[in-house]
Image (spheres, grey):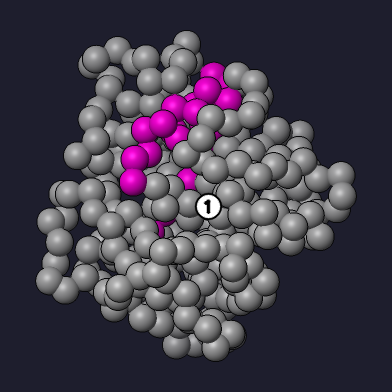
Amino acid sequence: MDRVTDVPESFAQSALPARVNDYDGFAEAYSAESEHSLVNAYYARPAMVALAGDVAGRRILDAGCGSGPLSAALRDRGAVVTGIDASAEMLALARRRLGDDAALHVVDLRDPLPFADGAFDDVVASLVLHYLEDWGPTLAELRRVLRPGGRLIASVDHPFVAYTIQDPRPDYFANTSYAFEWTFGGRSVPMRFWRKPLQAMIDAFTAAGFRVAGISEPQPDPAARDLFPDGFRDLSTRPCFLFFVVEAVEGVEGVEVPPSDAGSEG
């Protein structure tokens, strides 16, 4: 899901209630906040669209589609888009945006995907993998539903961001969770993400049968300079998200890759 608004107002560790990352509980507020925000509308989504390139006629799975802004942008460029998300409320907003005939499904990315092998040419996963402690099963399923040579285009919280906001600093090389609160619309909501070092991310892609084709640390859209002068300067000079383009290796299904090509999560 295109799931991060502006830099969260508070990264303070807190005693979290039972429900974290509860998008059903704040779908409307989140969607309204992120629709035109600096980090979403002028950074994360344009970067994903640019990495996708010419998508006319391509079958694309938007994994974690949220209220559907990225799906809409890709569909406007000629893609045939299917959207999945774990939040029924976010999907209701996506249906309002995309129309009653849109292919939208409530699916948790930790579960098997309801699609045939090789059903898609591309998968986009915008700011969603960092919700998962273990990327392995999810990446294996995304690899399965991609045709050989298909692409997974993914963005995550930059590992340096999660590392530097915590005090004391965690072990950079460990797979660690971090908790914080987002505040929008006068309401604070508890969130929890998982941080991996860069090498563990690459290893996870490789172990699932992908080849890394590109890693990107893009700049925000210059159009945001006058709209968000302070935020634009910050976003232009420090890392925020990390973007990957990885390709499904020909002749490889799931995680069955030769030992010389496989990595292991750190």
Which residue is drawn at the image coordinates 67% and 54% (left, top)?
Answer: 88
Looking at the image, the residue that sits furthest to the right is 100
Q: Is residue 158 left or right of residue 43?
A: left
In the rendered image, residue 153 lying in the magenta stretch gets the answer: yes
Question: Residue at position x 23%, y 16% from top?
Answer: 260
Q: Residue at x 56, y 59 (%)?
A: 2
Name the quadrant containing residue 212.
top left
Q: Is residue 254 magenta?
A: no
The span picked out in magenta is: 133-157
- Please name whichever residue, 180 or 238, is drawn nearer the observer in this view of the structure: 180
Q: Residues within 10 Å of mark 1 (few under 14, many from 20)?
A: many
Residue hosting label 1: 126
Relative to 115, does residue 216 appear above or below in the rendering? below
Q: Position of residue 220 (x, y in %)?
A: 50, 69
Q: From the top left corner, tell me how far across and down residue 173 is, in percent.
A: 15, 49
In the image shown, does 75 or 216 lie closer to the viewer? 75
Viewer can see residue 132: yes
Q: Residue at x 12, y 71 (%)?
A: 168
Name the residue type under label 1: Ser
Name the quadrant of the C terminus: top left
Q: Is residue 95 above or below residue 236?
A: above
- Image coordinates of residue 59 in percent, x first then y, are 70, 33
**x then y, percent, for residue 72:** 74, 54
Q: Is residue 250 left or right of residue 30?
A: left
Residue 222 visible in the current orientation: no
- Quadrant (top left/top right/bottom left/bottom right) for the N terminus: bottom right
